[in-house]
Each structure stands twice: as structure tokens, then as C-alpha cells.
Amino acid sequence: MEYYSSHINKLIEQLSHLPGIGAKSAQRLAFHIMNMPKDQVEQLTSSITGARENVQYCKCCCTLTDREICPICSNDKRDHSVIMVVENTRDLAAYEKTGKFDGVYHVLHGAISPMLGIGPDDIKLKELMQRLAKDEVKEVIIATNSSLEGETTAMYISKLIKPTGIKVSRIASGVPVGGDLEYIDEVAFFGGDGYEQVGFAYCSDKRSSEKEASLCLKRKQLLLTWQRGQESPRQLFPWS
Ligand code: ZN
């Protein structure tokens, strides 16, 4: 049975597509909007369309900006030979707030996630490599999250950059990777210096995934994944 007008239903549906907004929050927001003065609603809609239409990727670091080149990239006082790689513009803002970093950034807009089918081509990695080939860069600091996806991305980038001779560092993160096995059913193991020896496994059964991941480490296979119900591991990235 339809309880609300079809317009309200449509609004609720659209709002519920936003991240972190469930059906109940979407309803609450929709009714809040219904009670707002019309001019406020117009301001809201025009700022949404305005932001979407005028904000673009910085031609250099891919962050979201309303200029062709963002203020950080166009600042001569910043050290353009040090690039910090972050997952999104929010992370960039977080590092910027500390005021401790005077290099420049590269925003990936995501992280590699074999589970979600997000591969290296789906993030702004090609743009980073083009930048490294073109600009004089001394160091790349990888500041992706300490999540499984963030670590996978960090390893992948570090492998890509290594042959260029550019120094690669990784921002240290709080929780030791693979240390919190109780809370996850994805298991990641990382070992060795400079990401030389890396294992990665994903299983529904925690104990077997642990065993398989260490096996993977022993064999020095770089990145393997076991999907639920899958017989054997699958190498995701042909690293050698
Ligand atoms: Zn930029």
C-alpha cells in the first residue's frame, strides 16, 4: 500500500542511495525537506548541482577542486618532489589539517578491492604513474588506509614504483596488519622488507585462511586470493 505521495516516495528512494543513509534516515530527511521553506530547498538543490557541475579533478593530483590545477599543486612553496598518495580528498584534507606535510598529494579516489571487483584501472593509478614519469619526484609516501583494500593498494603501488628507483615509504598505521584476526574474516599477512614477501588470503573459514596465507608467504607468491567456496587460490596480479 502506498502511504506517501509518489513524489515523497521518490525522494526517499533517492536519499536512501546516499552512503550511510538507511531507509529510516531517508524518510526522516525527506520529511524534513518537506517542512523546509521553499527558498531553502532551492538553495540546497542548487548547491548540489553547482558542486557537481563545477567541481573537477585537479589535472595534476586528481583531488576535487574548482580550478584546473588545485591550490596545493599550484603552490610553488610546496615540495613537488614528495608526493603523498591518499585514497580520497577527505584524507588529503585530514593530512593538510595537521600542517606538517609540505609536499604535494595524489588522490586515488578509491582503493584496490578484489572482493568488490575494483582493480588498479578503476582508481587514479595510471595518472600517478604518468606523473612520476613526467615530474622529478624523489619520494612517494603511500598513505592509503590500513584496511585490507588500503594495504593491497599500497603493496601494488610500491611494486609498480620500485623499478623506477623512486623512494617509496608507507605511512605507519595504528592496528598491526593481520593482528586483529578475531574481528575479521578476511585475513591479510604482510612480511619482509619493502613488501618483498606478501601473502593475502580470503576465506570463510578463519583457521584455514590463516594456514593458506602463511603458505602463500612461504612460497613467496605475491598476491593470492581464496574466495568463499573456491577450490584453489587465484593469483590476482601477475607480479614477479
Ligand atoms: Zn592538485
Image: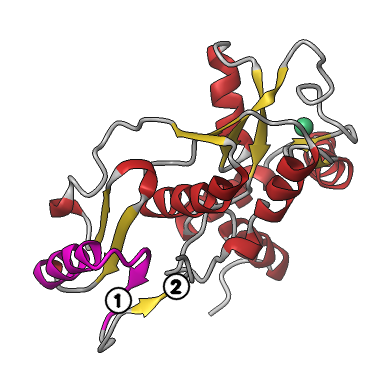
Q: Does residue 62 sit above or below 199 in this rendering?
A: above
Q: Residue 226 occupies which quadrant of the picture?
A: bottom left
**Badge 2 density bin: few <14, some 14–19, many ≥20, Cα 10 Å:** few
Q: Secondary structure at mark 2?
A: loop
Q: Which residues, given as a range, are shown in magenta?
A: 207-228
- Quadrant location, the C terminus: bottom left
Query: Marks 2/1: CA distance?
Result: 10 Å
Q: Which residue appears farthest toward the bottom when viewing the image?
A: 231
How was this image coloured? secondary structure
Q: Residue at x 18, y 71 (%)?
A: 212
Q: Position of residue 73 (x, y in %)?
A: 79, 26
Residue 209: tell me if it is visible. Answer: yes
Where residue 213 sits: x, y (%)? 21, 65
**Is 86 or 54 nearer to us in this picture?**
86
Residue 221 part of the magenta-drawn span: yes
| Mark 2 close to ligand 1, CB under 8 Å | no
Say which residue label 1 marks: 226
Tag on residue 236?
A: 2
Residue drawn where x is 48% and y is 71% of the image: 238
- Looking at this view, is 50 or 151 the one in front? 151
Instruction: Give percent across and percent down for residue 135.
Output: 78, 35
Q: Which mark is residue 143?
A: none
Relative image position of residue 90 (x, y in whole percent): 59, 34
Q: Residue at x 68, y 66 (%)?
A: 10
